Image (spheres, rainbow, N blue to C red):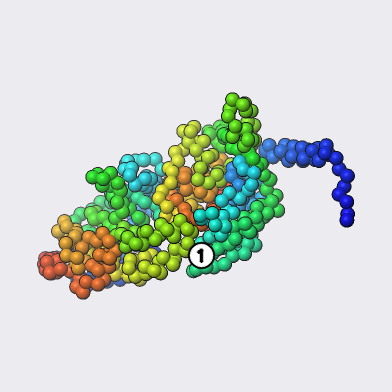
Amino acid sequence: MEKFSPVGEKDITHAIVSEFAKQFEEYVESDCIIIGGGPSGLMAGRNLAKTGRKILIVERNNYLGGGFWIGGYLMNKVTLRHPAERALDELGIPYREVSDGLFVADGPHACSKLIASACDNGVKFANMTVFEDLILKENGQVCGVVINWTPVSALPREITCVDPIAIESKVVIDATGHDAQVVRKLEERGFVKTKGFGAMWVERSEDLIIEHTGEVHPGLIVTGMAVSTTYGLPRMGPTFGAMLLSGEMAAGITLAKLRLRE
Amino acid sequence: MKIFLYDDSIGEEIDIKEIAHYLGQKLSKVKVKARGTPFLFNLSPDKVSDYAKKIASTKIQEVNRKVLSGQEPLYAEIEYEKRRILGKTKAFGVLYDGFLLQSIFREIKPRVELSLEFIHIIFTNRLFATWDESNKKYHLRTSIYGIPCLVSATGIVEAPAKPKEYYLLKQQYERLGQDLSKLEDKFRGSFIDYGDKRLTEVAKGYVMQAVFYSLTGDPFCEDKGCRLYNAHWQEELIFAQLKAGYEFCQWHTKLLGEAQASLG
C-alpha cells in the first residue's frame, strides 16, 4: 500500500490558514457578492463566474444548497415545472417527466451537481458566515456587505463581542430565500418597503418570481424566494424551477450592470 | 349604442371575435367592435410608465388589508406592469383591487366615449377582488360592472368556489408534495379551468350581464338557469352558462326584446 506523505500537524494548519487567507484577501473586493447559497444563489453565481467574473457566495450554514436537497415534507425528490428542465439539462442533472410539464429529480443528485457546477466555474464561498449589514455609498448605492462568523452571531453578545468586517463588490445579490435578509436591511434604513408573502398559489408564483427578479435598489439584485417576500408575491409550493431560472435571470441582469461599469 | 370589446392579455382563453359575433346576434342593431388592447389610445412611453405605476399601486398585499389609493409601488412592480401594458408578458397571478383597477381603465378611455351610449367591456387575465366592509376582507370577483366593465378569465376560474372536497384534497396534495395534475383529473369537468374550451361560452353570460347593467342598472337575475345569475359556486356557474337549457329567464328574454326594439 502506498503510504501517505509524512506531513506534520503544523504543515496542515499552515496550508489551511495560508490558502484561506490568500483567497479571503483576494475576495475582499469582488465583482459580485451573493448572499445565500441556495439554488437561486448558486445558479446566479455559476452563470456569472462562467463569464470570468469574481464571485463570492456568503452562506450562513456549513453546507451549501439551501432547501434544494429535499422536496416537500422532507422527501428528497425535487420537482420542477416546464421550462425549468432546460436548467437541469444544462447542469447535467438526470430527471424524469412524471406528468405533462412536471419533472422530478433526486434532490441530492441535483443539489450536488449544482454546487459542483458553481465550483467548477470558479465561484468562491464564505460559508459559516452571516450577512450583518450593507455598505451604502453615494445616493444609497449598495457597494458591499458586512459579515461575521455564524458562531459569533449565534452566541449571546455578552460573551462574543466580535466586530464584523466589510467586503466590497460592484453588485450584491440577495438570494436569502424567504427571509430576504438583505432587502430587509435596506428596509430598516427606509430605502424600500417589502411586502411579505401573498397566499400560496403555486400555479402562478413561479412566473411572477421570474417577472420580478431584478434590481430592487441601486446595486442590489433580488432573486429566488427573496423576490416573493420583497414584492408580496404568492408563496411557492415545493417546486424549484423558478429558483433556478430566477438565478439565471439575476445573473443576466448583474452581468449587464457589470458591463456598463467596465 | 356601441359596444367596444378589449383584450388585456387574454390570449387564447376567450375568443373575443366569437363574443362579438354573439353580441351581434343578441343585439343586431348595436354596433359591436373588438378594439384590441385597452391601452390603444395611450401608448406613449410617459403614459405607459404613468399607467404602469398606477396599476401597480392597486395591488392587494393582504386580503384583510384594504389597499389605499396611491400606495407606493416598487420599481420591479412598475416594470412588470409596463411589460404587461406593452404585451411583452402574459404572466399573471397578482391580485388587484377591482374598483381601483376599473378607475384606471376608465381614465384611459377617451372622454367622449365615457357616456351611456357606449359599453366598454375589457376582457383581462388579471385577477381582482373587492373589499367587503362587513367582514373586512377582499373577495375575488369574476366581473365588475360600470364604465368600463371588466370580465376576468382568471376570475371565472378562481372566483366561483370549486367543490369543497377539491380544496380539502388540494391542501393534502400540497403538503405531501403530490402531483396536482392528478387532482385536476379527479375533478375534471366539475369546474372551469385555465385553457378550458368552455371559457368563451361562459364569458358570453358575463358580457350579457355587462349589457344588462348598462341597460337597466342591474346585471343579475335570481333565476339559477338564467345567464345573468350571479354564481358563487362553479357548479352554479356551469349550470347557468352551459347546462340550463335556456339562455335567459322569461323576464330577461322580454327585456332583451324590448331593448332591441327601442335601440332600433
Quadrant including the N terminus of chain B: bottom left
Task: From the top left corner, tell me how far across and down residue B208 is, in percent.
Answer: 22, 64
Q: Is residue A103 above or below residue A228?
A: below
- Residue at 53%, 34% (x, y): give it: A140
Res. A183 visible in picture: yes
In which quarter of the view is residue B165 placed? Answer: bottom left
Farthest-out residue, front: A1
Q: Amino acid at mark 1?
A: Leu
Res. B123 visible in picture: no
- Residue at 47%, 58% (x, y): give it: B176
Q: Is residue A134 above or below residue A84?
A: above
Q: Dot 1, crowdedness within 10 Å: few (<14), some or many (≥20)?
A: many
> Is A161 placed left or right of A201 in the picture?
right
B165 vs B122, nearest the viewer = B165
> Is A91 placed left or right of B70 in the picture?
right
Q: Chain of mark 1?
A: A
Q: Is residue B148 above or below residue B194?
A: above
Q: How many marks?
A: 1
Quickly name the residue at label 1. A102
Q: Is residue A55 above or below residue B239?
A: above
B5 vs B156, nearest the viewer = B156
- Residue at 46%, 38% (x, y): give it: A192
Task: From the top left corner, tell me how far across and down residue A183 is, in percent.
Answer: 51, 40
Task: From the top left corner, tell me how far across and down residue A32 is, in percent.
Answer: 63, 43
- Residue at 54%, 57% (x, y): give it: A75
Label 1: state its secondary structure: strand
Task: From the top left corner, tell me how far across and down residue B61 is, in percent.
Answer: 38, 45
Farthest-out residue, bottom: B245
> Is A234 placed left or right of A163 in the picture?
left
Quadrant including the C terminus of chain B: bottom left
